[in-house]
Amino acid sequence: MFTGIIEQTGALVSLADRGGVRRITVEAPGIASRLREGDSLAVSGVCLTALEPDPKYFHADLAQETLDRTSLGRLAAGALLNLELPTAAGSPLGGHIVQGHVDGCGELRSLEPLVPYSSPTFDRQTTDWTLKVRVPEHVRQWMVMKGSVAVDGVSLTIAEFDGEEIAIAILPLTYWRTNLHTLSVGAPMNIEADVLVKLASMQLRSNQAQMPNLTEAWLVANGY
């Protein structure tokens, strides 16, 4: 389990075919040196298994499901990736519960500073930003105002939702510590809805499916 608090970014070195799967190689001094073969980690929000780690690099194989559902297979060498190791039991949950099971790929629509670029007070290092992401249609049912969402593995809070796009406030620390400052409009972004919202939605649908049709005859027969 992860919390969406990014520890560092790493650079995609390569994405190559290898024995029927695709293998990524990531340069990530710091996290790579802490990995053992078989460890899990989140790579831009995708839970992967580390292979052949060394002090500078690690590798991971991408299943077809991962290629179909996430952005990883579409990225070019040099792309920055958000990295997070699993949360140890008993550790503070700084973000929210993130499984690393991406629901679908969204699209970056805009990332604009709250202070206009033309303003004399604009400072790229200290301004807040507004991120807007188009959410895949099948994921929109779980977007909740003021609820949590993981975008490329980053735990964020939904400020607005118009039925298609989410708007999110981005602090300078988040902007610079993650890959957000490197992305352009149109970039694919991995979206994982809050698992608690998904579970609540599933339970509600189950309850509704079990409820009888409230006819007059049913109400009389059951003593109403």
Image (spheres, helix red, strand yellow):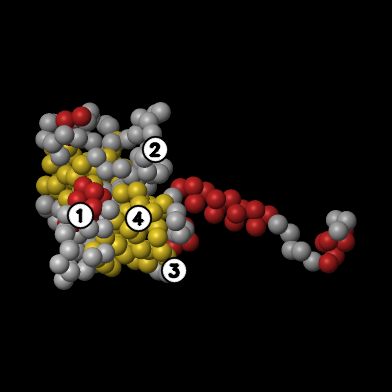
| Residue located beneath label 1 in the image | 126
The mark found on residue 93 in the picture is 2
Give neighbour class at mark 4: few <14, some 14-19, many 20+ (Cα, 10 Å): many
In this view, the residue in front, 77 or 145, is 145
Q: Quick one: quadrant of the C terminus? A: bottom right
Read off the residue under disc 4. 191
Q: Position of residue 214 (x, y in %)?
A: 76, 64
Question: Please, is residue 208 above or below residue 164 in the view?
Answer: above
Element on which disc 2 rests: loop
Which badge, 2 or 4, is on the more N-terminal residue?
2
Tell me where residue 205 sits by quadrant: bottom right
Q: Amino acid at mark 4?
A: Ile
Kind of residue at disc 3? Gly
Q: Residue at x 35, y 52 (%)?
A: 156
Q: Earlier in the sequence, mark 3 or mark 4?
A: 3
Q: Quote the CA–CA distance across marks 2 and 3.
A: 29 Å
Q: Quadrant of residue 87?
A: top left
